[in-house]
Image (spheres, coloured by chain):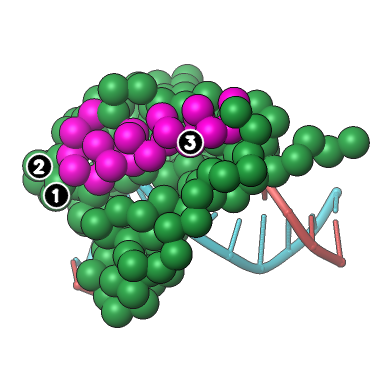
Chain colours: A green, B red, C cyan
DNA sequence: CCCTAGCGGTGCT
DNA sequence: AGCACCGCTAGGG
Protein backbone atom coordinates (compact mmCIF):
# COMPACT_ATOMS: atom_id res chain seq x y z
CA UNK A 1 0.00 0.00 0.00
CA UNK A 2 1.51 3.23 -1.18
CA UNK A 3 1.45 6.16 1.22
CA UNK A 4 -0.57 9.10 -0.01
CA UNK A 5 1.22 11.92 -1.76
CA UNK A 6 0.54 15.62 -1.62
CA UNK A 7 1.47 18.27 -4.17
CA UNK A 8 1.38 21.86 -2.97
CA UNK A 9 2.30 24.95 -5.01
CA UNK A 10 4.60 27.62 -3.64
CA UNK A 11 4.31 31.19 -4.91
CA UNK A 12 7.68 32.96 -5.09
CA UNK A 13 8.98 36.11 -6.78
CA UNK A 14 10.42 33.81 -9.44
CA UNK A 15 7.24 31.90 -10.20
CA UNK A 16 5.20 29.08 -8.78
CA UNK A 17 7.18 26.06 -7.63
CA UNK A 18 5.52 22.76 -6.78
CA UNK A 19 6.42 20.77 -3.68
CA UNK A 20 5.60 17.07 -3.49
CA UNK A 21 5.47 15.14 -0.25
CA UNK A 22 5.56 11.45 0.51
CA UNK A 23 4.82 9.91 3.87
CA UNK A 24 8.32 10.68 5.07
CA UNK A 25 9.09 14.12 3.72
CA UNK A 26 9.65 16.35 0.73
CA UNK A 27 10.27 14.04 -2.21
CA UNK A 28 10.31 16.51 -5.11
CA UNK A 29 10.45 20.20 -5.90
CA UNK A 30 9.51 21.31 -9.41
CA UNK A 31 10.61 24.57 -11.02
CA UNK A 32 7.96 26.89 -12.42
CA UNK A 33 7.26 26.31 -16.13
CA UNK A 34 9.75 27.95 -18.47
CA UNK A 35 12.94 29.85 -17.76
CA UNK A 36 13.26 32.51 -15.06
CA UNK A 37 11.91 35.87 -16.15
CA UNK A 38 10.06 34.31 -19.06
CA UNK A 39 6.39 34.94 -19.75
CA UNK A 40 5.02 31.55 -18.76
CA UNK A 41 7.15 31.66 -15.67
CA UNK A 42 6.04 35.15 -14.74
CA UNK A 43 2.43 34.20 -15.28
CA UNK A 44 2.72 31.43 -12.75
CA UNK A 45 3.53 34.00 -10.10
CA UNK A 46 -0.05 35.07 -9.76
CA UNK A 47 -1.54 31.66 -10.32
CA UNK A 48 -3.78 30.13 -7.70
CA UNK A 49 -2.14 30.11 -4.33
CA UNK A 50 -3.73 26.77 -3.48
CA UNK A 51 -2.64 25.84 -0.01
CA UNK A 52 -1.88 22.89 2.17
CA UNK A 53 -5.53 22.75 3.24
CA UNK A 54 -6.51 19.14 3.61
CA UNK A 55 -3.01 17.78 4.01
CA UNK A 56 -2.10 16.01 7.25
CA UNK A 57 -0.65 18.20 10.01
CA UNK A 58 2.83 16.76 9.54
CA UNK A 59 2.82 17.65 5.86
CA UNK A 60 1.57 21.13 6.65
CA UNK A 61 4.44 21.65 9.07
CA UNK A 62 6.96 20.34 6.55
CA UNK A 63 5.51 22.59 3.93
CA UNK A 64 5.81 25.69 6.09
CA UNK A 65 9.50 24.87 6.46
CA UNK A 66 9.86 24.22 2.73
CA UNK A 67 8.35 27.59 1.86
CA UNK A 68 10.69 29.48 4.15
CA UNK A 69 13.69 27.50 2.95
CA UNK A 70 12.85 28.08 -0.70
CA UNK A 71 12.32 31.81 -0.28
CA UNK A 72 15.64 32.08 1.54
CA UNK A 73 17.45 30.02 -1.07
CA UNK A 74 16.02 32.05 -3.92
CA UNK A 75 17.20 35.19 -2.17
CA UNK A 76 20.71 33.75 -1.96
CA UNK A 77 20.52 33.20 1.79
CA UNK A 78 21.18 29.83 3.43
CA UNK A 79 17.90 28.34 4.72
CA UNK A 80 17.53 28.23 8.50
CA UNK A 81 16.07 24.73 8.30
CA UNK A 82 15.06 22.18 5.72
CA UNK A 83 12.04 19.90 5.85
CA UNK A 84 12.69 16.17 6.09
CA UNK A 85 13.74 14.96 2.66
CA UNK A 86 12.62 11.70 1.08
CA UNK A 87 15.35 10.89 -1.39
CA UNK A 88 14.59 7.19 -1.51
CA UNK A 89 13.91 7.38 -5.23
CA UNK A 90 17.66 7.53 -5.86
CA UNK A 91 20.20 4.77 -6.29
CA UNK A 92 22.93 4.37 -3.69
CA UNK A 93 25.32 6.32 -5.90
CA UNK A 94 22.84 9.11 -6.54
CA UNK A 95 22.04 9.45 -2.85
CA UNK A 96 25.76 9.60 -2.08
CA UNK A 97 26.17 12.40 -4.61
CA UNK A 98 23.19 14.30 -3.23
CA UNK A 99 24.71 13.95 0.24
CA UNK A 100 27.88 15.66 -0.93
CA UNK A 101 25.88 18.41 -2.61
CA UNK A 102 23.95 19.14 0.57
CA UNK A 103 27.24 19.88 2.31
CA UNK A 104 28.36 22.54 -0.16
CA UNK A 105 27.81 25.81 1.59
CA UNK A 106 25.97 28.76 0.16
CA UNK A 107 28.25 30.74 -2.14
CA UNK A 108 30.74 27.90 -2.56
CA UNK A 109 31.09 25.46 -5.42
CA UNK A 110 32.72 22.17 -6.37
CA UNK A 111 33.44 20.72 -9.79
CA UNK A 112 31.87 17.48 -10.98
CA UNK A 113 35.29 15.90 -10.76
CA UNK A 114 35.78 17.12 -7.19
CA UNK A 115 32.48 15.61 -6.13
CA UNK A 116 33.54 12.33 -7.71
CA UNK A 117 36.85 12.47 -5.89
CA UNK A 118 35.10 13.21 -2.59
CA UNK A 119 33.10 10.02 -3.10
CA UNK A 120 36.26 8.00 -3.62
CA UNK A 121 35.41 7.59 -7.30
CA UNK A 122 37.84 9.76 -9.18
CA UNK A 123 36.98 9.57 -12.83
CA UNK A 124 33.26 9.33 -12.21
CA UNK A 125 32.71 12.99 -12.96
CA UNK A 126 30.40 12.26 -15.79
CA UNK A 127 28.31 9.96 -13.62
CA UNK A 128 28.18 12.72 -11.00
CA UNK A 129 26.68 14.99 -13.64
CA UNK A 130 23.99 12.44 -14.37
CA UNK A 131 23.26 12.07 -10.66
CA UNK A 132 22.96 15.82 -10.29
CA UNK A 133 20.47 15.81 -13.11
CA UNK A 134 18.43 13.19 -11.25
CA UNK A 135 18.24 15.33 -8.09
CA UNK A 136 14.51 15.50 -7.28
CA UNK A 137 14.86 18.49 -4.95
CA UNK A 138 16.79 21.17 -6.82
CA UNK A 139 17.58 24.45 -5.08
CA UNK A 140 17.31 22.94 -1.59
CA UNK A 141 19.69 20.14 -2.53
CA UNK A 142 22.02 22.55 -4.28
CA UNK A 143 23.01 20.81 -7.47
CA UNK A 144 23.50 24.29 -8.96
CA UNK A 145 26.68 24.59 -6.88
CA UNK A 146 28.49 22.07 -9.05
CA UNK A 147 30.43 23.60 -11.93
CA UNK A 148 32.46 22.07 -14.72
CA UNK A 149 36.23 22.05 -14.52
CA UNK A 150 37.80 25.49 -14.90
CA UNK A 151 34.72 27.13 -13.27
CA UNK A 152 32.74 26.82 -16.45
CA UNK A 153 28.99 26.75 -15.96
CA UNK A 154 28.39 23.15 -17.04
CA UNK A 155 24.84 21.91 -17.53
CA UNK A 156 21.56 22.00 -15.66
CA UNK A 157 18.49 19.85 -16.26
CA UNK A 158 16.07 22.52 -15.13
CA UNK A 159 17.54 24.93 -17.68
CA UNK A 160 20.77 26.89 -17.47
CA UNK A 161 18.84 30.08 -16.77
CA UNK A 162 17.93 28.78 -13.34
CA UNK A 163 21.48 27.71 -12.59
CA UNK A 164 22.80 31.15 -13.54
CA UNK A 165 20.15 32.87 -11.45
CA UNK A 166 20.78 30.77 -8.36
CA UNK A 167 24.55 31.25 -8.58
CA UNK A 168 24.24 34.99 -9.14
CA UNK A 169 21.96 35.29 -6.12
CA UNK A 170 24.72 33.62 -4.08
CA UNK A 171 27.31 35.96 -5.56
CA UNK A 172 29.18 33.08 -7.14
CA UNK A 173 31.46 34.10 -9.98
CA UNK A 174 31.93 31.71 -12.89
C1' DC B 1 37.53 27.67 -30.35
C1' DC B 2 36.88 22.77 -31.93
C1' DC B 3 37.47 17.63 -31.82
C1' DT B 4 38.54 13.17 -29.71
C1' DA B 5 39.14 9.43 -26.60
C1' DG B 6 38.18 7.71 -22.27
C1' DC B 7 35.45 7.71 -18.44
C1' DG B 8 31.30 5.70 -14.76
C1' DG B 9 26.31 5.05 -13.67
C1' DT B 10 21.75 4.13 -15.41
C1' DG B 11 17.99 2.37 -17.95
C1' DC B 12 16.22 -0.08 -21.72
C1' DT B 13 16.36 -4.35 -24.73
C1' DA C 1 24.97 -9.17 -21.89
C1' DG C 2 24.93 -5.23 -24.81
C1' DC C 3 24.17 -0.49 -25.85
C1' DA C 4 23.01 4.17 -26.00
C1' DC C 5 22.43 7.73 -23.49
C1' DC C 6 24.70 11.84 -20.31
C1' DG C 7 24.82 18.42 -16.31
C1' DC C 8 32.48 15.33 -17.53
C1' DT C 9 37.59 15.97 -18.45
C1' DA C 10 42.26 16.12 -20.22
C1' DG C 11 44.77 16.55 -24.18
C1' DG C 12 45.78 18.16 -28.86
C1' DG C 13 44.95 20.88 -32.90
Q: Please identify the residue farthest to the front as the structure is shown.
A: A53
Q: Residues within 10 Å of mark 2 (few under 14, many from 20)?
A: few
Tell me the residue that label 2 is attached to. A171
Please, what secondary structure does the residue beneath circle 2 have? Answer: loop
Residue A20 placement (x, y as % from top left): 58, 45
User: Tag 2, which chain?
Assistant: A
Q: Is residue C4 left or right of residue A78?
A: right
Q: Which residues are the magenta region?
A: A58-78
Residue A70 placement (x, y as % from top left): 34, 40
Q: Check the image and report above or below for A31 versus A80.
A: below
Q: Nearer the viewer, mark 1 or mark 3?
A: 3
A144 and A79: which is toward the camera = A79
Residue at x 75% of width, y 40% of height: A4
Count of numbered tags: 3
Which secondary structure type mostly characterizes the magenta part of the structure? helix
A2 and A155: which is toward the camera = A2
Q: Is residue A90 left or right of residue A151?
A: right
Q: Could you tell me if the residues under marks 2 and 1 are in contact, i.e. CB atoms within 8 Å?
A: yes
Please, what secondary structure does the residue beneath circle 3 have? Answer: helix
Tell me the residue that label 3 is attached to. A63
User: Tag 3, which chain?
Assistant: A
Q: Check the image and report above or below for A118 versus A162.
A: above
Residue at x 33% of width, y 34% of height: A69
Amino acid sequence: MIPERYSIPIATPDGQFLARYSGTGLCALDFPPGQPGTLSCRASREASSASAQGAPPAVQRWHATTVKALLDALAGRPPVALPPLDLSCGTAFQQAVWGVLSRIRCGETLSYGEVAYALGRPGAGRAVGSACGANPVPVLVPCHRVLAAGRKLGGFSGGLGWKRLLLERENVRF
